[in-house]
Image (tube, coloured by chain):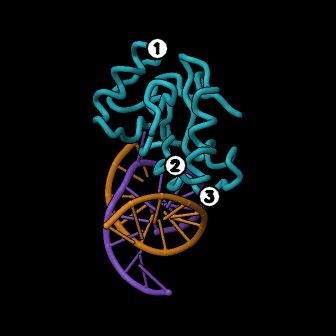
Chain colours: A cyan, B purple, C orange
Amino acid sequence: MKKITGFEQRILGLLPMIPAGKVTTYAELARAAGHPKAARAAGNAVNKNPHAPKVPCHRVVKSNGEVGGYAEGTDKKVKYLAKEGVMVKNGRIENFKEILYKF
DNA sequence: AGTAAGGCGGGCA
DNA sequence: GTGCCCGCCTTAC
């Protein structure tokens, strides 16, 4: 078993509960974790992403509707999102508010 | 123990 | 709509 830190486990545990075709924001994850201002930390946890497909990190975007970043490359992230039905235009989520999943 | 970096957020000009 | 600043939390070396 890989020993991971608490915050990481918290964030990673929230990712898989996001329905496909929807997205969430780092701020939301941080908020669900108990620290609404830990968006950065949330991103860090997701970035480590010890579990891969189980933790759809690509489903996590920025609060302003941008795709944000991705360990493998933002370009890939957009690709994966498009496959799930999330249209991304020029690095920004289309219908962001409509597909935004809130905890 | 302290420092540096990170896939951010929000506010203001 | 864009650009700039600061602030927040955590992890890793």
Q: Find out whether the residues at labels 2 and 1 contact each other: C-beta distance under 8 Å.
A: no
Using the image, determine if residue A30 lies above or below residue A82: below
- Mark drawn on residue A100: none
Q: Amino acid at mark 3?
A: Lys
Q: Are tags 3 and 1 found on a single chain? A: yes
Q: CA distance from mark 3 to mark 1?
A: 29 Å
Q: CA distance from mark 2 to mark 3?
A: 25 Å
Give me the chain letter of mark 2. Answer: A
Res B4 quadrant in image: bottom left
- Image coordinates of residue A29 in percent, x first then y, are 61, 43
Element under disc 1: loop
Disc 2 or 1, which lies upstream in sequence? 2
- Give the quarter of the figure containing the C terminus of chain A: top right
> Which residue in the protein does label 2 denote?
A3
- The residue at the point 49 percent across, 28 percent down is A56
Q: Nearer the viewer, residue C1 or B5?
A: B5
Disc 3 or 1, which lies upstream in sequence? 3
- The residue at the point 60 percent across, 52 percent down is A7
- Give neighbour class at mark 3: few <14, some 14-19, many 20+ (Cα, 10 Å): few
- Image coordinates of residue A5 in percent, x first then y, are 56, 53
Q: Are tags 2 and 3 found on a single chain? A: yes
